[in-house]
Amino acid sequence: MEFFIDTADVNEIAELVETGLVDGVTTNPSLMAKTGQSYQDTLAAICDLVDGPVSAEVTALEPEAMLQEGRHLSKIAENIVVKVPLTWNGLRACKMLRDEAIQVNVTLCFSASQALLAAKAGATYISPFVGRLDDLGQNGMELIRVISEIYGQYKHSLQTKILVASVRSPLHVVEAARLGAQVVTVPAKVLKQMAQHPLTDKGLEAFLKDWAKTGQSIL
Ligand code: G3P
């Protein structure tokens, strides 16, 4: 399973890349706006830090304009993946961008039928938003299960990877992995939470207490 970081914060990305746990980055207009920095410069800086795919979203709504923006974004760096929304026009733009061999992440997916269309349009990634479905009292992970089942039926003809987005907790990540999702994009906070367990802290405290009693040091 690949781990992408869901942020546009260059410092945060730089810190996490050092761990070797980061396979890519996803951004969106809201995350970009939060940085207060230039869109182009921020994307270029992120692509310098990360070897893997970096998703950059278009903001146009018409297919031709999305295509123009997508072409422009894809020139920032080789690892840019153009993100388009899962609208009818977004699907048309996806097809056009894929025809030019530009990688596409189709985002804002909330249903299996949308995911099916994105795959047919040649999406490199489909981004179902699990947390936002949970927020509505629906079951985000159930959508991942259904998409995974559908894509699995056509695994020889559909190449689209499931990129689980809007992840709010380590449990979302674990469930996504159990369902075989190829990618999960997580906020830095969730990635760090994944390493935490109170019994680990308690165990370590006891080990160090006992170790101190020996009066020894390893070095
Ligand atoms: O990158 C898109 C997605 O991960 C957004 O997450 O928490 O704003 O629903 P969230």
Image (tube, helix red, strand yellow):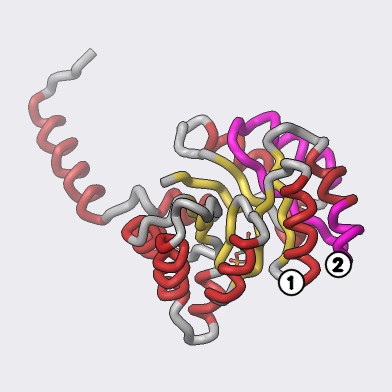
Residue depicted at x 59% and y 36%: 52
Instruction: From the top left corner, tell me how far across and down residue 102 is, in percent.
Output: 73, 43
Label 1 to label 2, Cα distance in Å?
Answer: 9 Å
Residue under circle 1? 87
Which residue sits at x=62%, y=62%? 120
> Is-magenta flag for residue 64?
yes
Q: Around disc 2, counting alpha carbons within 10 Å, would you say few (fewer than 14), some (14 to 19), or many (20 or more)?
A: some
Q: Which mark is residue 61?
A: 2
Give coordinates of residue 107: x percent, y percent. Answer: 65, 63
Q: Amino acid at mark 1?
A: Thr
Residue found farthest to the top: 219
| Residue at (48, 86) in percent of width and height | 137
Q: Quadrant of ligand 1?
A: bottom right
User: Regarding mark 2 in the picture, which secondary structure is present there?
Assistant: loop
Residues at marks 1 and 2 touching, judged by CB atoms closer than 8 Å:
yes
User: Under 8 Å from ligand 1: the CB of mark 2?
Assistant: no
Residue extent of the magenta highlight: 38-67
